[in-house]
Image (cartoon, rainbow, N blue to C red):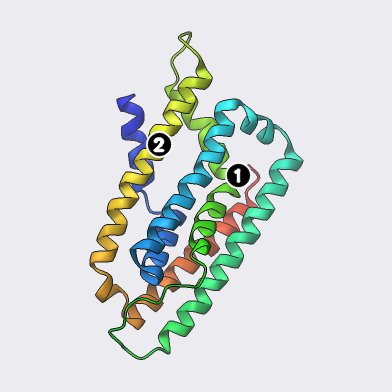
Amino acid sequence: MMAFAIAALVLIMMPGPDQALITRNALVGGRYGGLLTMVGGVLGLTVHAGAAALGLAALLLASTTAFTVLKIVGAVYLLWLALQMLRSAARSRRQPPADQPVAMPQRRSAYLRQGFLSNALNPKVALFFVTFLPQFLSVGTGSPQAEALLLSAIFALLYLAWFGLYIAAVDRLGRWLRRPKVQARIEQITGLALLSVAVRLAIASR
């Protein structure tokens, strides 16, 4: 269990689409925006973790058509999200410096939806749980499904703990990070990172 927790935490802490998206939304929507994106992200992970524990993910990966459809949908969504970030970066560059509070969007559910869909529509996340979890399952003891669900819950808790601390740090540095030029650069990096993931997802065979 400890070995799994350490390995999972290392993977969670590695820079990736989740970190880029949470960083951007924490700057645009404040701590609340970052936390909603984080909750959406962990819900998206839970979809694949639960499916892997129940064996559904293995069936998905066994079907070339189903995997391809999910891959295309996920890539298109990430591409759309990346273009939105790049457009936002262009707008941020034109904004004059101002010490104004962060403007909250009318629909805060957008943060939750972005976090959820970025993980739920990513078949690589399903592949991760199918290949990662079995390495830490005990052989011949108890129910493998129950143990897999327990490990998935531990992964989710570590995800929430790490990104909760990360969002607090971003919020603490928010005054500097929300300067138009800095925010524009962060949104540009976020957009390019999501664009890269979308391309890799689209061209990957499995």
183, above or below 32, in the image: below
| Residue drawn where x is 36% and y is 29% of the image | 4
Mark 2 Cα-neighbour bin, 10 Å: few <14, some 14–19, many ≥20:
many
In the rendered structure, the answer to whether residue 100 lies left or right of residue 17 reads left
Q: Quadrant of residue 47?
A: top right
Q: Please state which amino acid type lies under the numbered disc 1.
A: Pro
Pointer 1: residues within 10 angstroms few (<14), some, or many (20+)?
Answer: many
Query: Residue at label 2?
Result: 155
Look at the picture and state if 84 lies above or below 150: below
Residue at x-position 57% and y-position 54% = 117
For the C terminus, the image quarter is top right
- Which amino acid is tagged 2? Phe
Q: Is residue 140 left or right of residue 35?
A: right
Observer-nearest of 161 and 130: 161
Which element is circle 1 on?
helix
Q: Position of residue 169 (x, y in %)?
A: 25, 60
Residue 119 higher or lower than 107, as above or below: above
Q: Secondary structure at mark 2?
A: helix
Q: Which residue is mark 1?
A: 123
Q: Residue furthest left?
A: 172
**x then y, percent, for residue 41:** 47, 50
Numbered circle sitting on residue 162: none
Furthest-right residue in view? 65
Viewer-nearest of discs 2 and 1: 2
- Which one is in front, 198 or 33? 33
Say if mark 2 contacts mark 1, CB within 8 Å: no
- Point 54% across, 64% down: residue: 195
Is 58 on the left-hand or right-hand side of 181?
Answer: right
Q: Mark 2 and mark 1: span between their CA atoms?
A: 18 Å
Q: Quadrant of the N terminus?
A: top left
First in sequence: mark 2 vs mark 1: 1
102 horizontally vs 105: left or right: left
